Image (cartoon, rainbow, N blue to C red):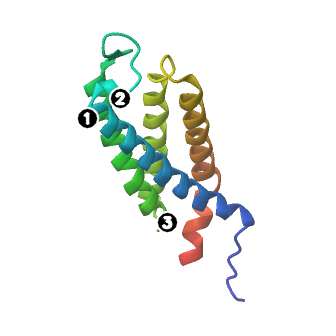
Amino acid sequence: MTDVKTTSGWVGWVGFAAIILILSGVFSLIQGFVALIGSNYYYAVENGTLFLFDLTGWGWWNLIIGALLVLTGLALFTGATWARVVAIIVAALSAIGQLLLVPAQPWWALIVIAFDVLVIYAVTAHGRELATIDD
């Protein structure tokens, strides 16, 4: 008998998750650069502080998370198990970081959190199928 491996159409969700991770990472990088370049150009809650971080700390957080999101999104296309695990962790960290933005920009923060949840769903529910394509 031949070993037939089938994948469902749901494997496209993992590709969607990878693209969303990359886009979210680019947006986070932009937010981080804007926060670091000058607080005059970024909306802050009061006196340059944003909930738990000052604006500079929040900018560095976004730069780090943004770079991790982009790299993880690229790695997710390989279908490697470690990339799926890292994608879940980084998406969760991104969502937690966006909670700090809710007082300043509630709609943007909620949209990013929703996409992070979609990424986590796609990777956890359908990530194994992506690895079987290459086998």
N-term-proximal mark, 1 vs 3: 1
In what quadrant of the picture does the C terminus appear?
bottom right
Which residue is pictured at 58% across the width and 66% down the height?
Answer: 130
Mark 2 packing: few (<14 Cα in 10 Å), some, or many (20+)? few
Q: Are marks 1 and 2 in contact (CB under 8 Å)?
A: yes
Q: Is residue 102 left or right of residue 47?
A: right
Which residue is pictured at 47% across the width and 29% down the height?
Answer: 98
User: Residue 82 in the image: x percent, y percent?
Assistant: 41, 57
- Name the element at disc 2: helix
Residue position for label 3: 77
Residue position for label 1: 37
**Residue that protrudes farthest toward the top in the picture:** 46
Comparing 7 with 41, the one in front is 41
User: Residue 52 in the image: x percent, y percent?
Assistant: 35, 16
Q: Are marks 2 and 3 in contact (CB under 8 Å)?
A: no
Which residue is pictured at 43% across the width and 62% down the height?
Answer: 74
- Name the element at disc 3: loop
In what quadrant of the picture does the N terminus appear?
bottom right
From mark 1 to mark 3, how far is it between C-alphas? 33 Å
Residue position for label 2: 41
**Residue that protrudes farthest toward the front in the picture:** 40
